[in-house]
Amino acid sequence: MAALSLGVRAAIASFVILAVFLAFWHLGTQGTGPGAAMDPEYAKLMGVTAVTGQSAMPGPGQVGIKLWEHLINPFYDNGPNDKGIGIQLAYSLARVLAGYALAVAVALPLGFAIGMSPLIYRALDPFIQVLRPISPLAWMPLALYTIKDSGLSAIFVIFICSVWPMLLNTAFGVATVRREWLNVARTLEVGRFRLAFAVILPAAAPTIMTGMRISISIAWLVIVAAEMLVGGTGIGYFVWNEWNNLSITNVIIAILAIGMVGMALDQTLGRIARLVTYPE
């Protein structure tokens, strides 16, 4: 039999790892002694009967059944505090994409200016170094006070957390373009506009796309925490609301959904980066 390809072997290894994880999860939630018994008060809050030897943590079977219920009806809307996980993810994605688009519109041209001009770099560097380390969530109280809208405040926080990786990577990519290419362009009397788009942008594109990929991951991470603070709608609010309802199964499903959407966003930017870096 011919040797299996690397991709097939990797898929088999991933499946085995998943199977082992699910097996340990299942065994870990079964319990074998008094220490694993569900607390009666906790069971009362959960609305179930306490069973000696049964863990309070849901097993993979319970999560799978609940996940199927969410998948067959992800967009139900039964009121402010009872919306489907599809609606919650849609709200979060809309906020992330809006804040991310604003960050792209600011970071790319400003990064170009910083990378091409030592004067602009020296003038803006102190402000960047002061603002960049500030946690995005630290801006939330100020945003809520000034904007007075939780959704727009969350978009502002996404903008703040997304702008720095793109800005710095763009500036670095532009500043490190090979001098020989720039000298040849000047020798050919290429204008600054054409120089930026025909020479500098293609050369700096891999670094710029790396910054954009980092930014989208940070933005998706931050939106969950932001929505926990502001409430209303979104996957972050869904997690916090389900925790308040003591529905650990829904919390686990939300965590899985957050991870899957985050992976999809990263893979999308990764494919775009490969197209930019290695055009066919």
Image (cartoon, rainbow, N blue to C red):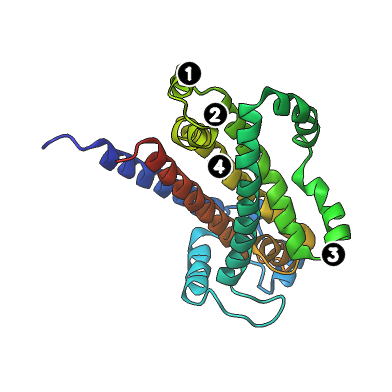
In the rendered image, which quarter contains the C terminus?
top left
Check the image and report above or below for 68 versus 122. below
- Residue 68 pos. (x, y %): 47, 70
Q: Write down the residue under mark 2.
A: 173
Residue sticking out furthest to the front = 189
The residues tagged by marks 3 and 1 sit, at their Cα atoms, a distance apart of 51 Å
Give the mark nearer the N terminus: 3 vs 1.
Answer: 3
Other-residue count near label 3 (Cα within 10 Å), few / some / many at <14 / 14–19 / ≥20: few
Q: Please give the name of the residue rendered at 53% of the width and 37% of the height, measured from the top-left corner.
A: 193
Q: Is residue 199 visible?
A: yes
The residues tagged by marks 4 and 1 sit, at their Cα atoms, a distance apart of 28 Å
Of residue 115 and residue 90, the one placed in the foreground of this image is 115
Residue sticking out furthest to the left = 1
Q: Please give the name of the residue rendered at 49% of the width and 69% of the height, measured from the top-left corner.
A: 65
Q: Amino acid at mark 4?
A: Met
Mark whose residue sits in front, 4 or 1: 1
- Residue 61 pos. (x, y %): 48, 63
> Element at badge 4?
helix
Q: Write down the residue under mark 1.
A: 183
Check the image and report above or below for 52 versus 33. below
Other-residue count near label 2 (Cα within 10 Å), few / some / many at <14 / 14–19 / ≥20: many
Q: Write down the residue under mark 4.
A: 212
The residues tagged by marks 2 and 3 sit, at their Cα atoms, a distance apart of 37 Å
In the rendered image, which quarter contains the N terminus?
top left
- Residue 252 pos. (x, y %): 59, 58
Q: Write down the residue under mark 3.
A: 148
